[in-house]
Amino acid sequence: MSSSEINRALFDEVMVPNYSPQQMVPVRGEGCRLWDQDDNEYIDLTGGIAVTALGHRHPALVKALKEQADRVWHLSNVFTNEPALRLAKKLTEATFAERVFFCNSGAEANEAAFKLARKYAHDHFDEEKSEIVSFVQSFHGRTLFTVTVGGQPKYCQGFEPVPGGVKHAPFNDLAAVEALVSERTCAIVVEPVQGEGGVIPADPDFLRGLRELCDRHNALLIFDEVQTGVGRTGSLYAYMDTDVTPDILTSAKGLGGGFPIGAMLTTDAIARSFSVGTHGTTYGGNPLGCAVAEAVLDEVSRPELLVGVADKHDRFVAALEAINQRHGLFADIRGKGLLIGAELVHAWKGQAGRFLAAAREQGVLILMAGPDVLRFAPPLIIEDADIDAAMASLERAIEQLIQEGPES
Ligand SMILES: *Cc1c(COP(=O)(O)O)cnc(C)c1O
């Protein structure tokens, strides 16, 4: 097979059609830039969907990966390993958590969290205490349990029957949650900023209210920080910027900086319910993944980096607001740190995908969060000049689309 046959068209022949990737194939990355097969250059504001927190090919991550590659790649859970122990130690020192479970993705971290919440409730209360309360529009992954807990029915449709014992309340509506929570509730799970659901931050009072409800009903509070974690919102984990501490926290995406890894963090008392044999995964705590994640954590924990995230947020939002003054395209610009959403005005609802393609043609890669919201999740190390250049390219894409007009 010659390399000219390896192209975007091949995707439609050999891949299961569950994705619809952009019409080019990136082959190389460096910092905030990507190059495709024809050597076209792009500024990458997708960050691999909030994953490549330190950009592409960060020297510290490449070094960690190469060094570990020369030692040992894989051992399984029959053994522990040094990178996993070092990473767990650092995560417990940096957060509320005392115990860590490693896995390979966000969905797996949440699956572990939901199973642990049920197990803990069954161990300490009774079988009836099994309900999980979650939120409309929330996203927790694509396994059958996590799509069921997620608040987007389209991800469950066609996959029924789904697991039971899950209830959904409107996000940021404490009274609605209160009406659903009872002694049967084992956990409430919330994203501090709903990511896939449209980049919607939780109100601080709402999070405080959830903590109180959990305490009152002996339920566990789970923060899904798969998207918000590892510096994305300007603190190491988003909970640190609230006065609420969860009982379980899930992390993935940015944690590996591009190497697949997930983690579930919790307290010693809760962790005990996952006694020997109760849960597991072959690759979880893989030495390669943990070595890279340790390097990510070291870099992201640097105070300058986290302060920079807040500054860059302001620069992004100012640029988007200026674009909006000229073009009146956004009904709302919101988010935290470098997780930013721009909701399209009514006339452009449902057409976020057109902006992704138009922006790509102008050399800037962006995301959507549902059909109505443009989403930006660039590397946390993006430089001001790249933000400015990307926003100028985005504006050219917007001008072009406005000329074409909204589809009716
Ligand atoms: C992406 C995401 C997940 C799922 O992570 P995967 O690694 O794709 O399984 C879960 N929760 C949130 C909040 C996410 O953004």
Image: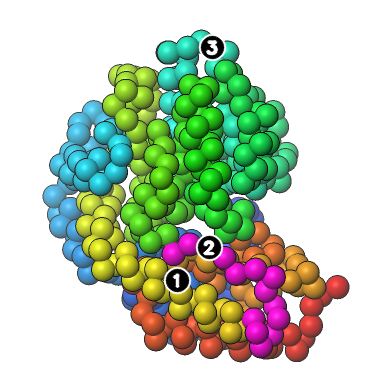
Task: Look at mark 1 in the image and give the residue it sits on.
Answer: 313
- Which residue of the protein is positioned furthest toward the right in this rendering? 408
Task: Look at mark 3 in the image and give the residue it sits on.
Answer: 127
Residue 46: horizontal and vertical position, in percent?
49, 68
Q: CA distance from mark 3 to mark 2?
A: 39 Å
Q: In screen coordinates, is 273 left or right of 391?
A: left
Instruction: Looking at the picture, tell me which residue is in the foreground, 71 or 142.
Output: 142
Residue 32: horizontal and vertical position, in percent?
39, 76
Answer whether labels 3 and 2 touch (C-beta < 8 Å). Answer: no
Asked whether the viewer can see residue 243, the reply is yes
Instruction: Looking at the picture, tell me which residue is in the foreground, 343 or 28.
Output: 343
Highlighted magenta segment, given as a residue range = 324-337
**Quarter occupied by residue 228:** bottom left
Task: Look at mark 2 in the image and give the residue it sits on.
Answer: 335
- Position of residue 181 relative to residue 129, above or below, is below
Residue type (three-letter) at the residue carrying disc 1: His
